[in-house]
Image (cartoon, rainbow, N blue to C red):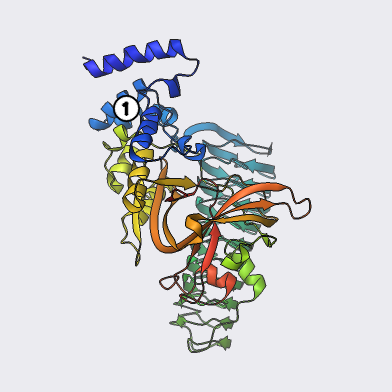
Amino acid sequence: MMSPLFLLILLFSSLTVGFSGSSGDQNPFTPKAYALRYWDKAIQNTLPKPSFLTSKASPLTAIQAAKYAKLAATNALTTRLPEFCSAAHLLCFPDITPNLSKRDKSQSFTGYEDGQNFTSYGIGGAGSVNNFKNYSDGFFNPGVNEFRSYSRSSGGGSETFTGYGEDTNVVEEGFNTYGKGSGGGTGEFTQYGTNSNVPTLRFSSYGEATGGRQESFSKYSDDSNAGDQTFSNYGKNSAGAVSEFDSYGNNSNVASSTFGSYGAGGAGQNETFTNYGINMNVPEENFNNYGAGTTGGTQTFTNYRDQANVGDTSFSSYDKGSNQGEATFTNYGHSFNEGTDTFKGYALNSTAGKAGFKEYGVNTTFKEYNKDGVSFSGYTNATTSSAHISGSLAKKWVEPGKFFRESMLKEGTIMPMPDIKDKMPKRSFLPRSILTKLPFSTSELKRIFKASDESSMDKMIKDSMGECTRAPSAGETKRCVGSVEDMIDFATSVLGRDITVRSTENVNGSKKNVMVSKVKGINGGKVTKSVSCHQSLFPYLLYYCHSVPKVRVYEADLSDPNTKAKINHGVAICHLDTTAWSPTHGAFLALGSGPGKIEVCHWIFENDMTWTIAN
C-alpha cells in the first residue's frame, strides 16, 4: 500500500509534467529542487548558484527518489541495482555476459567492444595464422572485460595480438591464457592496458608449457595511472623456447603491480626481460620468480625499478635452483629518489652456472645469494647519497605548471598550464533522502554495489573509504560528502553562511602556455581559509572536502600568449604553510626546496572546487 506522501508526490508530479516542458527543475519534489531550496536556506547571500555544482545534483525524478529511498531503507536496493545506477547516473560495473564463445584456427579480428567475455580464440590450430588487433581499446568509460584463451595448444602457428584495453578509463580486465601448450611457431602480444586510467589488470598465463616457441610481449600497463596489476605466468615449464618481455608498468603513476613467474621450470630456453617499473612514480612492485628451477638456458633481466621515484619494491627469486644456466641481472632499484627495495634470492642453490649482477640501488637489502659463481659489479649501500634529481626527471613525474610559486600570479606572466581536464567518470550526487539510508561502510557498500573481492569496484570503495576515514593531517578539517546538501553543511560549518564556491571556468589552455592577465585576490588577497573539494573514485559522486588554514585564493583571467585573447578564468589556491608536507611531495620535486620553506600554489582543476567567504 502506497503512503499518502508518495501518492501526493505522484499526483503533483503528473500535474507539473503537464505544466512544464522539463519537469526536473519545475517539480519542487525532485532531489535537485530540494537541494536548490536548501542552498537558499543555508547560505545567506543571493550570489548565483554555479552550474558546475548544481548540475551534479541527482537527476532522479520525485517518484524515482521515493522508490529508491524505500528500497534503501529495507536493504533491497541491490535487487534493482542496474536500474538504480542508470536512473541515478552512478558508476556501476555490469555483469560479464558470454559472447563470441569460440573462434578456431586461422582468424583475423579487428575490433571488439567493451563489457563482454571472449571465451576462446584460435584454439588447437596447427600451422594457423591468427591476428587479433584491438580488444576494448579507446573505451573511455568504466568497463569489465575478460579474455579466456588465445591460441591454446596450437602447433607451428604464428599469432599476433596487437592491443588489449588501451586508452581506457576505470577498467577491470582479465586475460587468462595465451599460447599455452603450443609447439613451435611464434607469438607476439604488443600492448596490454597502456595509457589507461585506474586499471585493474590480470594476465594469468602467457606461453606456458610450450616447446621450441618464440614469444614476445612488448608492453604491459605502460603510461598508466594508479591501478593494481598482476601477471601470473610467462613461459613457465617451456622447453627450448625464446622468450622476450620488453616493458612492464613503465612510466606509470602510483601503480601496485605483481609479476608471479617468468620462465620457471624451463629447459634450454633463452629469456630476456628488459624493463619492469622504469620511470615509475611511487610504485609498489613485487616480482616473485624469474627462471627458477630451469636447466641450461640463458636468462637476462635488464632493468627493474630504474629511475623510479620513492615506492616500495621486492624481488623474491631469480634463477633459484637452476642447473648449468647463465643468468645476468643488469640494474635493480637504481632510482633518483630512494624507495625501499628488497631482493631476497639470487642464483640460490644453483649449480655449475654463471651469474652476474651489475648494479643495485640505495636504501635496499639483498638477502640469500649463491656465494659461488656469482659476481657483483656495483652495489650501492644505504649510506650513499641519492642521485641528483634532474629537471628532465622531475618533469616526468610532475607535469609542468601543476605547482608554482605565488610570485607567478601577476599580470604578464607566461607559464605552463597543466592538464586540468577531469579524468573521472561522470556521476551524480545521491539525494540526501537515499544517502542517509546507505551505510557508509566498506563491507555494506561492497554488498550493495556487488563488488567482488580484489575487483576494481572493491579497490575503488576501499581506497576512497580509507581516505575518508583516515585521521586528518595537522591543522586539517575534513569530510567526505555525497550530496549537495552535505557539501553546503560542511562549508558553512567551517566558513560561516556568507560564502560562495569557485572553480576554473573551463579547460582551455590545458597542456599549453598561458599568459596571466587580470588577477584578483579573494578577501582582498589576505591570508584566509577555504574549503577545497576534490572528487573521489566511487560509485556515486563523492567529494573529499577539507579546510587547511593559511592560504590565499586568487582569480585570474588567462589569455593566449600570442593573440592576447582571453581563453579562461582560473582559480588558484596558494598554501602558505607546507611544514607538514612530505619531503617527496611533487611540489618540492618540481620547485625545489622542502617542507615549510616555500609556499606552493596550484590551479583548481575541472570539477574540483573551493569555497571561500563571499567577496
Residue 228 in sight in this render: no
Q: Residue at x 56, y 37 (%)?
A: 114
Which residue is nearer to you in this view: 532 or 277? 532
In the image, residue 392 lies at what x, y percent? 67, 71
Q: Quadrant of residue 113?
A: top right
Q: Amino acid at mark 1?
A: Tyr
In the image, residue 316 lies at what x, y percent? 45, 72
Q: Is residue 545 above or below residue 28?
A: below
| Label 1: element kind | helix
Q: Residue at x 69, y 38 (%)?
A: 110
Q: Is residue 596 above or below residue 548?
A: below
Which residue is nearer to you in this view: 200 or 431? 431
- Looking at this view, name the residue that lies furthest to the front: 524
Q: Residue at x 35, y 27 (%)?
A: 80
Q: Is residue 583 above or below residue 471?
A: below
Q: Is residue 426 found left or right of 482 in the rendered image?
A: right
In the image, residue 87 lies at what x, y percent? 43, 27
In the image, residue 224 lies at what x, y percent? 57, 55
- Looking at this view, name the residue that lies furthest to the right: 562
Which residue is nearer to you in this view: 416 or 494? 494
Q: Quadrant of residue 62?
A: top left
Q: Is residue 93 found left or right of 190 in the rendered image?
A: left
Residue named by callout 1: 68
What is the count of numbered marks? 1
Q: Residue at x 55, y 39 (%)?
A: 120
Sort mark 1 into few (<14), some (14-19) or many (20+) by Cα contacts within 10 Å: many
